[in-house]
Amino acid sequence: MTFATPAGSFQALAPLTLSIPPGRFVSLIGPSGCGKSTVFNIVAGLLRPTAGRVFIDGDDATGTIGRVGYMLQKDLLLPWRTVVDNVILGMEIQGVPLRQARQRALPLLRRYGLGGFEHVHPNALSGGMRQRAALLRTLLFDTDVMLLDEPFGALDAQTKLHMQEWLLQLWSDFAKTVVFVTHDVEEAIYLSDEIYVMATRPGRLVETIPVPIARPRQRRVSLTREFIDIKERCMQLLTAAHNAALEEAA
Ligand SMILES: Nc1ncnc2c1ncn2[C@@H]1O[C@H](COP(=O)(O)OP(=O)(O)OP(=O)(O)O)[C@@H](O)[C@H]1O
Ligand SMILES: [Mg+2]
């Protein structure tokens, strides 16, 4: 992916290949600016890559919107709509009649911790609840794939742990393929089947790290040798990528 900018052309991403089997939970990690959101924008069809293709379920989906659920880095709940009407936005865009869409969404809101808040506006929700609403909206977009760009980045540590369990529950209930972006290495390991580590300038994939830890996982898994080794490898790669980016900038 190369962007045309006023300062000239800028290569945001070098050629990279990601191949994600259905039903997997994978994470993308890498320093700020390595192109994680750009990869998502390309996969979601919002951005046409300068070269390369996106295949979903074997179909060429390059530049095609509507094939994946996408939760953007900033939770974009519309302040003038109630929680339920925010959650059905994707369905509405897909042409599902309002009443029917609400009927589908309401039990999910109750089941997944937003009962009693269906008809309030987002400003009445806590940070964790807002993220849950945004995630349910992505889920209800009803595609096999969900792209989640740092969904828990702004939450306090305790709420974040809670949301991780909540997301794993959703993932196992709905059998989606999840691609997750985070700056939190432990979060990536705890949640993922596989971690893709990226580096900058140009943004590229440097290593794919499998996480062969059995599920369901206990929190104390983070104290095991296996977990610590994976964490160390991730940290090494991230530190190297970070230092390289600083050197470039200097
Ligand atoms: N529309 C655009 N025009 C020009 N450059 C862009 C555009 N979008 C992104 N970039 C550049 O591409 C690079 C990758 O940006 P991107 O937002 O994908 O990074 P990121 O890995 O998601 O970072 P962060 O972790 O901070 O969210 C950055 O250098 C960014 O400035
Ligand atoms: Mg980003």
Image (tube, rainbow, N blue to C red):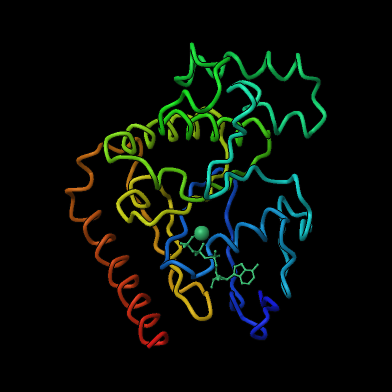
Give me the residue at 42% from left, 66% from top.
30
Left-right relation of 96 to 218: right
Q: Position of residue 52 (x, y in %)?
A: 72, 72
Foreground residue among 53 and 66: 66
Left-right relation of 99 to 239: right
Foreground residue among 212 and 234: 234
Which quadrant of the figure contains the C terminus?
A: bottom left
Q: Position of residue 56 (x, y in %)?
A: 71, 52
Foreground residue among 159 and 181: 159
Give me the residue at 37% from left, 52% from top.
188
Foreground residue among 185 and 19: 185
Give me the residue at 45% from left, 34% from top.
167
Q: Is residue 178 above or below residue 240?
A: above
Left-right relation of 125 to 93: left
Q: Position of residue 65 (x, y in %)?
A: 76, 50
Count every numbered label the image shows and give the total. 0
Q: Position of residue 221 (x, y in %)?
A: 23, 44
Give me the residue at 36% from left, 87% from top.
247
